[in-house]
Amino acid sequence: MPHAPDPIRRRCANALRMLAIDAVQAANSGHPGMPMGMADIAEALWRHHLKHDPADPQWPDRDRFVLSNGHGSMLLYALLHLSGYDLPMDELKRFRQLGSRTPGHPEVHMTPGVETTTGPLGQGLANAVGMALAEKLLAQEFNRPGHDIVDHRTWVFLGDGCLMEGISHEACSLAGTWGLNKLVAFYDDNGISIDGDVKGWFGDDTPARFEAYGWTVIRNVDGHDFAALDAAIAQARKSGRPVLVCCRTQIGHGSPNRAGTADVHGAPLGEAEIALVRQALDWDAPPFEVPAELRQAWDAVERGGAQRRQWQQRFDAYARAFPELAAEFLRRRAGGTLREDTAAALARAVLDAERRAAKVATRKASQEFLDAVAPAMPELLGGSADLTGSNLTDWKGSRPLTGQGSGNHVHYGVREFGMAAVMNGVALHGGYKPFGGTFLTFSDYSRNALRMSALMRLPVVHVFTHDSIGLGEDGPTHQPVEHAHSLRLIPDLDVWRPADATETAVAWQQALQRGDGPSCLLLSRQALPHADGGQERADLIARGAYVLRGARDERVVLIATGSELQLALAAAQRLADEGIAARVVSAPCLEVFERQDEAYRRSVIPRHLPRLAIEAGRSGLWWKYVGEDGDVVALERFGESAPAPALLEHFGFTPQAVAERARRLLA
Amino acid sequence: MPHAPDPIRRRCANALRMLAIDAVQAANSGHPGMPMGMADIAEALWRHHLKHDPADPQWPDRDRFVLSNGHGSMLLYALLHLSGYDLPMDELKRFRQLGSRTPGHPEVHMTPGVETTTGPLGQGLANAVGMALAEKLLAQEFNRPGHDIVDHRTWVFLGDGCLMEGISHEACSLAGTWGLNKLVAFYDDNGISIDGDVKGWFGDDTPARFEAYGWTVIRNVDGHDFAALDAAIAQARKSGRPVLVCCRTQIGHGSPNRAGTADVHGAPLGEAEIALVRQALDWDAPPFEVPAELRQAWDAVERGGAQRRQWQQRFDAYARAFPELAAEFLRRRAGGTLREDTAAALARAVLDAERRAAKVATRKASQEFLDAVAPAMPELLGGSADLTGSNLTDWKGSRPLTGQGSGNHVHYGVREFGMAAVMNGVALHGGYKPFGGTFLTFSDYSRNALRMSALMRLPVVHVFTHDSIGLGEDGPTHQPVEHAHSLRLIPDLDVWRPADATETAVAWQQALQRGDGPSCLLLSRQALPHADGGQERADLIARGAYVLRGARDERVVLIATGSELQLALAAAQRLADEGIAARVVSAPCLEVFERQDEAYRRSVIPRHLPRLAIEAGRSGLWWKYVGEDGDVVALERFGESAPAPALLEHFGFTPQAVAERARRLLA
């Protein structure tokens, strides 16, 4: 080990190394290499710069710390434990065990001090960009001269894997364009990834790449030299742009035989090598024990508490000077509630949509809803991945985000995955209610970030327009056929496919009121007629599925979503003309419907009648609702390029064809 | 318009512009801006450099041309038509109409001369990287001194959108690392994307970024100046590295009122503006008519035929000198057949797996299969997204790809999407049978490239290991629960989830023999016991689902895949002990099973018996097979971090729990 100027610092870092080693060994599973390699950087940041109060992990003006290379989770757990968070040693001993608060990868809401769930590489970095964006916007919105109540940084640890992933390009390009100067990323440049020496597959000049994004790059920092790290962090704090600190490190630093090799990345060191590490680090304490002087050196409760109290005093002064702003600021924290008048505004927008009864594309109905409710929801932060005029995610009075950090509609550029992961970061940070749009097909690009929003139960809204072959000429690359179902398969994600303006408004209303998870809105390019359903329809829509048209002596049930509801209605009319009474069920959100009690569900979709589902996509999950004696008017293949009416006819989405399929069920 | 040194060239380019304008106008849909902006670049490349023979679009040594900004499809159709491909004017008149060969975005196998299907931005560029990789590998493998039978380039057109997408980072980093010097990309730097002037959301210094990837960048080329374009292409041809030609262009060039604005990107110009364009371009010919002198100037049949014949002579000489190599080369073209001994080797590997009857992880069984068959399949090109030792995609004697362009196992780095799109490019090019591995969860990252492989019906194989909560401690970010079904939803994609080594071998056999579409192999991390099924099991496995254990007086059917088959067998045993006869069906591939005749399907999964499906993931599509009176032992939520046995117990994947669920069906 290089000689340290301040031996306590090296020993503090070694405490992190040993806890990581011990926990991975106890679990017989995990990743010791990264914690050992980044321990010195972690010491430099956490003991000397990070603004946080272990006693109040939700303090709004805390710095955010993101471990984008989440497999090194033990580094973070060791940091949290030693800093004084509510994460006792017993939890470290139960690393990676069922029910522990120390899962294999960090999970937000599971462990105090963990700011986001990381694991799928590159996304933590993108979340951090979202957090830094939220900070910048909040500062712009709430700070007043002499009152900087929003003034914190976002710090990221990341490795080669994050930098190889495409999302790092999307997120870091945006961070540069937005000038997020309070974002500082530490690159663990250890030259090793799982397959070995990265030279064979990662030849980028990463510093030059980040300079091309408009970042400040601090090159060639020795990641095991505290003086160099201190100097780099001091420089980073002064930058007017996002900062990449390139730290040369040795993976598994401290392991005599494994350091610098891929072997140390993802497997326990084993007892023999651990004994050698103890020798090399001059570490006498037994496993999971930390000498008192190091515990004391790490303890951040006092310093953090003082920092927080100082902020509280400043905030109190702010609250005296700007009481309304201060109240609004507190409301807007992560997990905050809606403004008192918001629920009324949402309900009014639903009623207005129903009253207008217009034939309108649901993407347009979505914009009309936003026009109506945005004045009552200053927390809205819209956006689109370069399809604003198609997704219609902007609204009357929305202001495009500028480099100066104001605005409430974000032009994310052609970056679907980056957009979704940045939105997750904004939601995690708090202050804004993010939503963003792209075409439904391109939900594929952002899919894992949607999954992460569901896993983290973040209240974000994904607006996916052009939701079927009904988009027409752009052809099969742009026509979703499997996407509605594939989104429905993600747990805890509510997928709405509204059939008209009223259903669209209710979908938005539910999505915005949902505090504990994400929602998708699947919206049509083409105009859809209003579905008459009477005054109480809004309440029924909010149950996920409902009987839109009942009849006496029903003989068949037609179940449809979105643009196909009109087909079901027209087919039912045809059947009625022949004396066959058909029920029509509109099912805009199967997830919400599944949360209803069984009696309601059976009352809407009865088992004793033949059932036909109609949706312009794969039959997929519909068999659960129609049973094996039922049928699905579906599209089991990719689409074609042609005008929408020609396609719908070609693929059998006509009232005649639907009525015929229903008739066959009765034969 | 700037004055052209050679007026015929400008007029040739204008012919492209006018055809694009007329076709978009006739369709009342499409994208005129890009063709108008890139027409001069297209003239420079296609009339003076592109090596191709319109009479033989499959000529193996042709240059590949990829329109990554596929929305500008009319540019490509105009080029193909004028060059002499079998794409008559009538097809251009039917642009974007049902059944035409001129769909909204270019589709391979639909239109002669179209090399790949593009539309989802960034992927064409990544396909091109795959094509250039295949060319380099083929040249290395087949060329002999004095016999350069593989010597062609890959040319790409791309726009701002492609460059913003994350996949451009993954693919171009690889191209730089691999030194693909025959790859030349033309960047349509028009400063406009759909949302307007890109400055607000795309601040990258793109030339510096590509230099950081190790590319040669030719900056500041006037994309409307033929002399500048000629000089740039001449320089590009000499580069020892991949080349980005940065062309400053004006979107919609030639449109007096719309040029340089986002309005011209994706909407017809309208009759009034078209009249002004005609005036500005001094273009007298009626719509869809091209003056004879320009037709003649564009016609590439003679020049291309001469090039191809010249190559044929060289190939004939090669075939005389190296007859075996020449025969192998021809066999290896895209759509080529397997070697005569390959089928036998595949079958033998299946039998060997069955004979060994080993308890082994299916990812390990997969590697054993590769060990056995690789000697008979020199076309195999394996790889992994930095998980080689976990995916086990390498084999005895596989050689890692090096920058020198040899090797048959590719370290793609942590780039799942790039890997999948590069594999698509390799398959499109021909010469190699690509497969690549990552964890199943990260199929999310590559999802749209999987979709594209299915849409293009490319014979690629995706190896997805760690296929359930059975992976254990890495936790919910790494545990797929929705992925098996979400892959099954992609049309034309065969999804195999084998239960033991024999099923794994058959899955590989079928995937490698499949010529008309992609396959996924979902493989376990954990060891799985051999399922005894007798000699004929291999044939049954190949039918997608089969009765593994029958019984007299069966009262219930248990259907399982992968690691859950052993649970079904153990549960059946428990039930048998209680006197309840249960059938056990193994269903490794539902897509293949659906292609069997109905009689077979009914014979395997009979409707008259209660049915229980068991799969450690969402119930999703299983309701189609068990009916609403059936049940599914499933995991409807995200997983947890814990050792696999604890998780399986916790989530009810035990023989006891399965038997109990079966019993309830009989109540």
Image (tube, coloured by chain):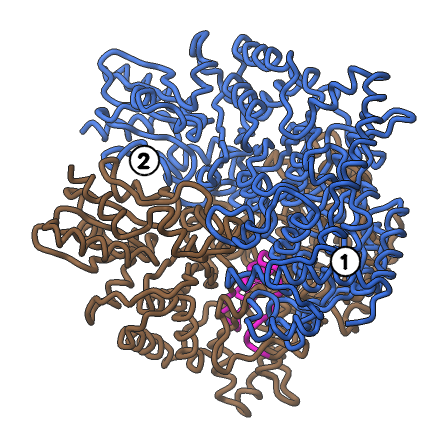
Chain colours: A brown, B blue
Splitting the image into 4 quarters, where does residue A22 fall?
A: top right
Q: Quadrant of the N terminus of chain A?
A: top right
- Please name the residue that numbered disc 1 is placed on: B41
Report x, y in % for residue A203.
81, 46
Report x, y in % for residue A371.
43, 78
How far apart marks 1 and 2 lie (CA) works out to: 53 Å
Report x, y in % for residue B501.
53, 18
Which chain does tag 2 point to? B
Nearest to the observer: residue A93 or residue A468:
A468
Res. A68 in view: no
Residue with the most extreme left position: A553
- Please name the residue that numbered disc 2 is placed on: B624
The vertical placement of A420 against B614, above or below, is: below
- Disc number lying in front (1 or 2): 1
Mark 1 or mark 2: name the one nearer the start of the chain. Answer: 1
Taking the image as shown, residue B567 lies to the left or right of residue B375, namely left
Task: Identify which amino acid the numbered label 1 is placed on.
Answer: Ile
Q: Is residue A119 magenta?
A: no
Give the residues in magenta. Answer: A407-436
Q: Secondary structure at mark 2?
A: helix
Taking the image as shown, residue A66 lies to the left or right of residue A324, namely right
Look at 58% across and 56% down and name the residue there.
A417
Task: Identify which amino acid the numbered label 2 is placed on.
Answer: Lys
Picture disc at residue B598: none
